[in-house]
Image: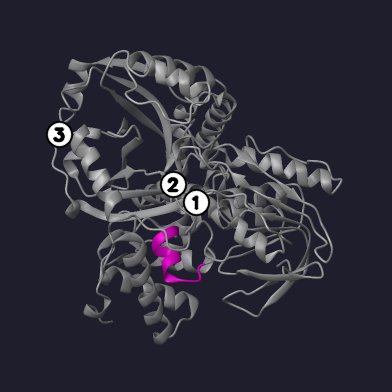
Amino acid sequence: MTDRSGTDFDVVIIGAGINGAGLFRDLCTQGLKCLIVDKGDFGSGTSAAPSRLIHGGLKYLETGEFRLVAESTYERNLLLKNAAHLVKPLPTAIPILSWTKGVTAALRTLFGSTTAPRSRGALLVKVGLSLYDFYGSRARQMPTHRMIGRRRALAEISALTPGIVALGTYYDATVTAPERLVHELIEDGLKASPASDALNWCPVIGQSEGRLRLRPETGDERTVRPRIVVNAAGPWIDRVNGILGLDSHYIGGTKGSHILLDHPELLRQLNGRMLYFEADDGRILLVLPFQGKALVGSTDIPSDEPDSVACTSDETDYFIQSLRDLLPGLDFHRDQIVFAYAGIRPLPNSQGVAPGLISRDHSAPKDPAIGPRSFPVISLVGGKWTTFRAFAADIADTVLADLHLPRQRETDDMPIGGGHGLPRDPQARADWLDATAQDSGAARTRVETLLERYGTTAQAIARHEGAAPVRLTDAPDFTEAEIDWIARNEHVVHLSDILLRRTPLAISGQLTPRLCHHVATCAAAALGWDTQRKQAELGKLATVLAERHGVCLDFDAVRD
């Protein structure tokens, strides 16, 4: 096993969200020795709080960001190939309430107005979707758009407001487990560069004489010496730069909140598609099927409190009322909410610009080495989930140039995690399932479930489970052996790592006190937790669920 305890690294990346993880994989693929650290879990900050979309940025056409749309649609198409186990096509419909409204306002926005257009009519939507098809033609994976008339729209989605005149339909994509994708990028990086290292729950606490001081939860304090530091801390960028001796004001973040509803009739009417719609105030919202629930989002509110961000009561009321306006044929109320989450988008500091109009493009200001800080600091500002690979490639090229090293491999066609060797056609899939079932002793139906969840990583998990795995209490689609494998192989430090990020058990609304106890028992056996540590983990989980996700569970009611 390669020793990762050394102190010298080519690059230290602070922040293990999607941008940091993407850069880590890229640099490791080029043969660099890298360290990625995060004060929380991998993918636990802003990267855990997206709308679960991998999209080309249809709304960016309004602000004239055509280059960003071209990049985004291309990257979306690549992810549909490279991470097909986690990124899936998503049919989408735009309810349209007029024929010609919004054209003048859209032109004003295109030419620099700081107010967003409203009442986007069928003509404007048609032009926008045609442009979207054009920009999405590179490496195309999905069909082009269509316009549907009022009668057919109401026949397909009877609960829609009768005021609609048409539906614009097109395809984007959804990521079923964004936190897993972050983790898989990091694992790919470690495999590509075995001398590299990745540390979660490990804040950077200072720097001096060209060294960074790290304080991991699961070991002694460390110091490391980087040649280059990349600050990928998202909304925490300016705070991390302060620790590094820099006074920066790069970030002007906005909060995006989401709720998940247990609403079977809404799911039936959605029928696998997303509704991308305009709220009464002009804000674009969405509702889509996700993990058996209906995901609703998102807001766009200026905020600089990433450590305590949560969906508020006012935001919840806003979502509920917007759904009632769009779908008056359905009932919506707070009791349907099973989970909520929020995050701060690390947008560039853009005072005086409406939040919805702040560019989602990325930049990377560089602060040169100076005085006792012998390494330069590159800060990753902005960006969006879909374009992480392109952002990483840009920064990797900058780093390689600074280190006078050539790029060894492009990442455009590089599979991610369980996307490696993923069977794509029906016959290859059937052969893979048969071979894995025979090799592991697991039932073929179980192997198919694991393949959908983990891609080809399912093979190792199926072998670990064997023929007769014990199902979890209140979540029979998961097993004790599956949790044991995750705990032993996926950098788990806390119980919340498993329930909130390595699995969809929390966001899908499946958590019960009995289930949390059961998973805690599995984790304790795998990680050597004693009874006191297990109870402490349950207590921390309860606090996080209540304060950040609106989920209140009484663990005292369950005893082992």
Distance, label 2 to label 1, CA atoms, is 6 Å
Secondary structure at numbered mark 1: helix
Residue 262: x percent and y percent? 22, 49
Which residues make up the magenta segment?
492-501
The residue sitting at 44% across, 33% down in the picture is 427
Instruction: First in sequence, mark 1 or 3: give its number.
Output: 1
Name the element at disc 3. Answer: loop
Residue 71: % across, % down: 58, 29
Residue 251 or residue 73, whichever sits in front: 251
Q: From the viewer's side, name the closer residue of 510 and 241.
A: 241
> Relative to 395, is 203 on the left or the right?
left
> Alpha-carbon neighbours of circle 3 within 10 Å: few (<14), some, or many (≥20)?
some
Position of residue 201 relative to residue 149, above or below, is: below
Query: Which one is in front in this view, the residue at disc 3 or the one at disc 2?
Result: 3
Residue 458 appears in the picture as rendered? no
Q: Is 223 drawn above or below residue 486 in the view shown?
A: below
Magenta run includes residue 494: yes
- Look at the image and tell me whether residue 332 can be seen: yes
**Magenta includes 242?**
no
Q: Which of the two labelled residues, at mark 3 and mark 2, occupies the earlier sequence position?
A: 2
Check contact, mark 2 vs mark 1: CB within 8 A.
yes
How crowded is the residue under tag 2: few (<14 C-alpha within 10 Å), some, or many (20+)? many
Label 2 SS: loop
Residue position marked by numbered label 3 in the rendering: 328
- Mark 1 surroundings: few (<14), some (14-19) or many (≥20) residues within 10 A: many
The circle on residue 47 is 1
